[in-house]
Image: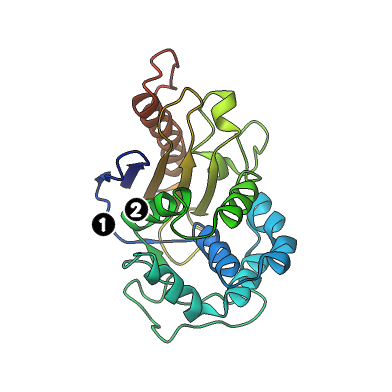
Amino acid sequence: VGLAVIPFDTGELAGWREDRLFISASAPKSWWTAAALANGQAEAAAQFAGPVFEVSSDGAAGSMIDLAGGIDAVNDFTLSVGMTDTAAIKWHHGRRRESAQFPGPLNGSNHVDASDAALFFYELGTNQVLTPDLTELLAEWMRRSPRDVATHPADPEASTIPDSLPADVKELVEQKAGWLRPGEYSVPAHLLAVGIVRPTNGASPYAIAMMSVGGDRPVFARVIEFFQAASCRIYVHQADDTSWTCPAW
């Protein structure tokens, strides 16, 4: 497991194994979209935003890469915001896309660590990545992602950050999850959840990144529950909301 949190009011990262690399799965669809917006493609990107954030469409995410200027333009973008342990190596949905950095350190897999993901969302949320209007546009799109397991039971992985938070906070979470379920790929199972939580009691917003690798199906189910519980406990601490009860784990 790798975890990282950056409160907006301090800009200081707290983490656990925050520099461990993970296969990034669908988590980078958020910064690929940001790269398309930074490339002046907001109007064109709008048609793909729903599929990317509502159902995590791989094809639509490929279109975001194209709108950003290609896979190495995406890498230039992430490096420009300080994500030094992040790379898009290949994305062959719709058509073949390969980076000049191929094959990369994880046997040709796209990768990220928790510190990079938290840094991106901290800088995004404090208007250091995009203009304020584009930042709000991306926030609006990311709030279209699943809110809880109850409304998206087929994909319990998709909402681990907001799932256990208070209803008013849950609705404001900007997030994207990524997952590789056990036994469905040639690599170990992965779960990633990244985004921004905005407490409604006046406490500082914060960037959060949670990542895991390994486990069979029963273990993977427990990791989902762990992420839900961890997100809630981080919220209670950061917002000092001792009235809110988190799920046991």
State whether residue 1 appears in this view.
no
Q: Classify 10 Å Cα crowding around label 1: few (below 14), some (14-19), many (20 and above).
A: some
**SS for tag 1?**
loop
Q: Which mark is residue 114?
A: 2
Could you tell me the amino acid type at mark 2?
A: Ala
State which quarter of the image contains the C terminus. top left
Could you tell me the amino acid type at mark 1?
A: Asp
**Which image quadrant is residue 62 in?**
bottom right
249 to 140, vertically: above or below: above
Q: Which is more toward the observer, 203 or 89?
A: 203
Q: Tally the marks.
A: 2
Q: Which residue is drawn at 42% across and 71% down?
A: 109
Q: Which residue is drawn at 35% across and 58% down?
A: 116
Q: Residue at x 32, y 66 (%)?
A: 85
**SS for tag 2?**
helix
Q: Which of marks 2 and 1 is nearer the N terminus?
A: 1
How far apart in space, not on screen, are marks 2 and 1 (Cα)?
6 Å
| Residue at which label 1 appears | 19
Q: Position of residue 174 (x, y in %)?
A: 55, 44
Q: Which is more toward the observer, 241 or 103?
A: 241
